Image (cartoon, coloured by chain):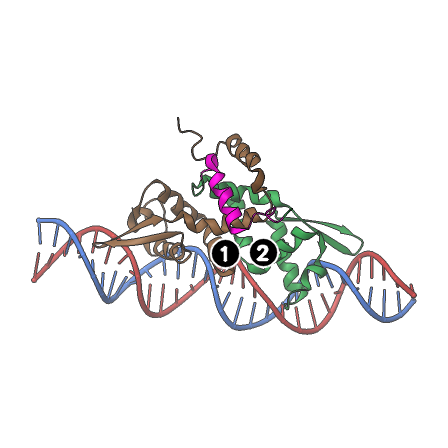
Chain colours: A green, B brown, C blue, D red
Amino acid sequence: MTLSLDTIFSALSDPTRRTILAMLLEDDMAITDLALPFTMSLTAISKHITILVRAGLISQEKRGRVKWCKLEPDALRDASVWMFAFGQFDPLHLDDFERFLEQENLAPNSNTD
Amino acid sequence: MTLSLDTIFSALSDPTRRTILAMLLEDDMAITDLALPFTMSLTAISKHITILVRAGLISQEKRGRVKWCKLEPDALRDASVWMFAFGQFDPLHLDDFERFLEQENLAPNSNTD
DNA sequence: ACGATCGTCAACCAAATGGTTGAATAAGCT
DNA sequence: AGCTTATTCAACCATTTGGTTGACGATCGT
């Protein structure tokens, strides 16, 4: 468990990798597609993706010559729980947090009609 | 903001540092005290603490020759928000998450009478 | 069968990370 | 004043990280 927190937080600490995760929020994508918005080499992106896979944050399925990447948001749960269990937001009084999210307009559904 | 996510997640990715944070959950502590449970040198712990301070996760106040370290859980908020905004738990339906925390017995108040 | 596309591998590199030791600074104790 | 405690500094070291390039194996389209 400690090991997984290590790898998850470490995976999340790189902006390129966080961007990749955000892209996968939209849709499953191939590695080449994921590499498109970046200026760095495909190899570099491939390595980043390997790190995300090792952390369990994304999964891959090879269809033909293309490797489809899929977000695995459950992997964030351990980390979430750690942070919550940490006491910064009292999970028994999550209303505050919810209100905060809406304030910041960061709730994923905050702009769904 | 991206920068702060970098430094926060990176700070959290080390088990020594997470342990230090957990210790500070109990009480404010001096650096020497924080170093006690570890086998590594005081200098090493001092460096870890510097990293936590830079990430905003703890603050320090020097009284006399002793530097008291205090948890700053608010710093975790950006990271929390990122993870939530990420969609793994729908903040508008947090009941699931709440239930999960209680299941796992990880809610900080789960054992408060 | 051939050329283009998808992705990885191997080798290399610079910089960052996590640790060490020994000395230095600063404050407290007697 | 002199010893002790608290913390940092400086220099060093090994390993990891994040990137590069060039070659390679697989698969697709024609």
In the rendered image, which quarter is residue C13 located in?
A: bottom right
Residue A60 x %, y %: 70, 50
Tell me, yes or no, whether the highlighted magenta stretch contains residue B65. no
Q: Chain of mark 1?
A: B
Three-letter code, disc 2? Arg
Identify the residue at horizontal 64%, vertical 47% (top origin): A112
Indicate the secondary structure of the residue bearing disc 2.
Answer: helix
Mark number displayed over residue A29: none
User: How crowded is the residue under tag 1: few (<14 C-alpha within 10 Å), some, or many (20+)?
Assistant: many
Residue A105 x %, y %: 54, 51
Indicate the secondary structure of the residue bearing disc 1.
Answer: helix
Please say whether residue A69 is visible from this viewpoint.
yes
Mark number displayed over residue A18: 2
User: How crowded is the residue under tag 2: few (<14 C-alpha within 10 Å), some, or many (20+)?
Assistant: some
| Count of residue discs | 2
Q: Are the residues flagged by discs 1 and 2 in contact, CB closer than 8 Å?
A: yes
**Is residue B1 shown above or below B71?**
below
Residue A1 x %, y %: 52, 41
Residue D25 x %, y %: 78, 60
Please say whether residue A1 is visible from this viewpoint.
no
Tell me, yes or no, whether the highlighted magenta stretch contains residue A91. yes
Front in this rendered view, residue A98 or A21: A98
Q: Which residues are magenta?
A: A90-111
In the rendered image, which quarter is residue C7 located in?
A: bottom right
Q: Is residue B58 left or right of residue A12?
A: left
Identify the residue at horizontal 22%, vertical 55% (top origin): B65
Q: Is residue B85 left or right of residue D24?
A: left
Label 1, on which residue?
A: B5
For this orientation, the residue located farthest to the top is B113
Three-letter code, disc 1? Leu
